[in-house]
Image (cartoon, grey):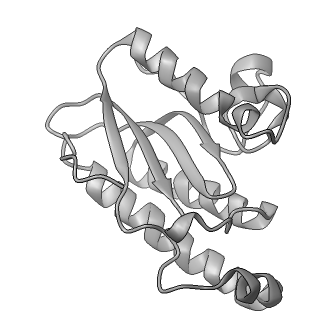
Amino acid sequence: MSNRPIADEERYVHFITFSCDHRRRLLDHDHPRRIVLGVLNGQLTRQGATCVGFVVMPDHVHALIWLPRTHQLSAFMHEWKRQSSFRIRSWYRDMDAAYFKEIGHGDRFWQPKYYAFAVHSRAKLEEKLKYIHLNPVRAGLVERPVDWPWSSARWYEQGRSVGVPIGWVE
């Protein structure tokens, strides 16, 4: 994605983006999306982190994550990507091998790197949250952010559960 260094010396919200290798649409099915969110839940619990918002798209993921201690981001991301890759590949082999074969399994599930941006202000946090919630609309998948079940937009707009605990960080 980028050779940009990841700043992780202070506690702030990280705007994170990571993609399927070669931008393959490996997250078209609901179950792989559920796996991504399930692994995210586990990582949030293990590291005492807070998810401010997220969206799972067909070929990439955006998230706003706050970690309680510095220098945790790399480990958080490594485990999120490693565990979700293993579980999704296993699901495809068992449940939809034809789809996986058709799109090509490749050497990797995720691109090896991720992009992280330090969010230092409330205004920037709100901007990034709006950006991720509008992603499915810009992609033509839905007409309104709240209609995409794979994001935190429903939690913010309707107070509905989105499968991941959402919290605000000042």
- Position of residue 70 measured from the top left corner of the image (x, y, whole percent): 19, 41
Instruction: Kindly identify the residue that appears in the image at 55 percent across and 61 percent down.
Output: 39
Q: Is residue 57 left or right of residue 114?
A: right
Residue 164: percent from left, percent from top: 63, 43
Q: Is residue 97 above or below residue 164?
A: below
The part of the image, by quadrant, that contains residue 137 is top right
Q: State the count of labels.
A: 0
In which quadrant will I find the C terminus? top left
Q: Could you tell whether 154 is left or right of 5 in the image?
A: right
Q: Residue at x 40, y 16 (%)?
A: 124
What residue appears at the point 76 percent right and 62 percent down from the top-left corner? Answer: 28
- Relative vertical location of residue 90 with respect to residue 71 in this rendering, above or below: below
Q: Residue at x 51, y 58 (%)?
A: 19
Check the picture and name the quadrant holding the N terminus: bottom left
Q: Nearer the viewer, residue 5 or 167?
A: 5
In the rendering, at what x and y percent does residue 159 appear?
76, 22
Question: Residue furthest toward the top?
Answer: 123
Q: Which picture quadrant has residue 162?
A: top right
Residue in the foreground of this view, choosing between 133 and 38: 133
Image x and y of residue 84, in percent: 55, 69
* Residue situated furthest left in the rendering: 9
Q: Nearer the viewer, residue 49 or 87?
A: 87
